[in-house]
Image (cartoon, rainbow, N blue to C red):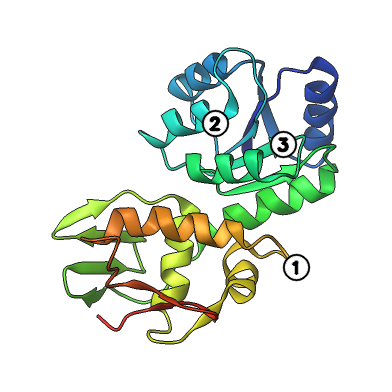
């Protein structure tokens, strides 16, 4: 059973989502505050975190930032607004996806299933690109011999891009291939994830060697 850590301070919203997710077959561990969520993750693992932005004490952004220091568990942010502040803030903090409230349970179910599918996929043996090694079988990435800690969405983006070196992918293509959004999604998901991925695998993010921008079109992997 997939275990969801549901972090929502509004009792009615939390109880409604918890009931809906349980009916969909998930195990749910509710938390009312950011502190409680972080403690819950220390006490036991979760397969995915559904995290509200507006929380008392530590807000969702700070919870996500602290979580990313020690965990690559998928995080889906819940935001009551569709403006840049919440969306970009969540993505920059390390969230893998977001859903705007009020939340339709089956939409959230689809997002959870998509992010978990990204983790389970594996491919061919290790590939070497200069000092970067991508092992598709074990889903381990190393740079200069040291393992790089990537979130599931960062790993999926790297696998997609590196799977077709020099091919230019538009943001819309990457939304479909990486996030599995079946609608015209938000390109900020792609740009924020590219920035985080570059920070982890590039020696110089101002002159990226691996994840390159093709102005007016999108992104490509290499040449390296």
**172 left or right of 22 in image:** left
Tell me if mark 3 has few (under 14), some (14-19) or many (20+) residues whose alpha carbon lies within 10 angstroms of its own: many
Indicate the position of residue 85 as horizontal and vertical percent values.
63, 39
Task: Specify few, some or many for label 1: CA neighbours under 10 Å numbering under 14, 14-19, or 20 or more.
Answer: few
Q: Which mark is residue 203?
A: none
Residue 208's x, y, as percent? 30, 68
Residue position for label 2? 61
**Secondary structure type for disc 2:** helix
Viewer-proximal residue among 96 and 128? 96
* Residue 35 vs residue 106, the one in the foreground: 35
Q: Which mark is residue 184?
A: 1
Q: Residue at x 24, y 80 (%)?
A: 224
Neighbour tally class for label 2: few under 14, some 14-19, many 20 plus, Cα within 10 Å: many
Which residue is at 47% across, 73% downward?
160
Label 1, label 2: how many angstroms apart (C-alpha)?
25 Å
Q: Position of residue 136 (x, y in %)?
A: 36, 69
From this view, report whether residue 193 is shown above or below residue 133.
above
* Relative depth, front residue between 179 and 195: 195
Q: Earlier in the sequence, mark 2 or mark 3?
A: 2
Q: Secondary structure at mark 3?
A: strand
Tell me the residue that label 3 is attached to. 79
Check the image and name the residue furthest to the left. Answer: 145
* 2 is higher (above) or lower (below) than 180: above
Give the CA distance from mark 1 to mark 3.
19 Å
Q: CA distance from mark 2 to mark 3?
A: 11 Å
Please say whether residue 117 is visible from this viewpoint.
no
Q: Earlier in the sequence, mark 1 or mark 3?
A: 3
Residue 103 in sight here: yes
Instruction: Identify the residue at horizontal 52%, vertical 60% (top origin).
Output: 191
Q: Is residue 183 left or right of residue 153?
A: right
């Amino acid at each position: 059973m997939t275990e969801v850590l549901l972090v929502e301070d509004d009792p009615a919203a939390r109880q409604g989502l918890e009931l809906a997710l349980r009916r969909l077959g998930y195990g749910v561990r509710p938390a009312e505050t950011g502190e409680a969520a972080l403690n819950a993750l220390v006490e036991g693992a979760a397969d995915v975190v559904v995290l509200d932005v507006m929380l008392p004490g530590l807000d969702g952004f700070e919870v996500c930032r602290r979580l990313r220091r020690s965990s690559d568990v998928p995080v889906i942010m819940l935001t009551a607004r569709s403006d840049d502040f919440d969306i970009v803030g969540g993505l920059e903090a390390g969230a893998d996806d977001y859903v705007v409230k009020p939340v339709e349970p089956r939409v959230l179910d689809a997002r959870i299933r998509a992010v978990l599918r990204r983790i389970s996929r594996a491919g061919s043996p290790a590939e070497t690109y200069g000092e970067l090694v991508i092992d598709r079988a074990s889903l381990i990435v190393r740079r200069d011999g040291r393992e790089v800690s990537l979130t599931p969405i960062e790993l999926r983006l790297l696998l997609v891009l590196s799977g077709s070196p020099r091919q230019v992918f538009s943001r819309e293509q990457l939304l479909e291939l990486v996030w599995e959004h079946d609608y015209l999604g938000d390109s900020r998901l792609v740009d924020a994830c590219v920035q985080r991925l570059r920070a982890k695998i590039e020696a110089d993010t101002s002159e990226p060697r691996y994840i390159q921008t093709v102005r007016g079109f999108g992104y490509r992997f290499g040449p390296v």
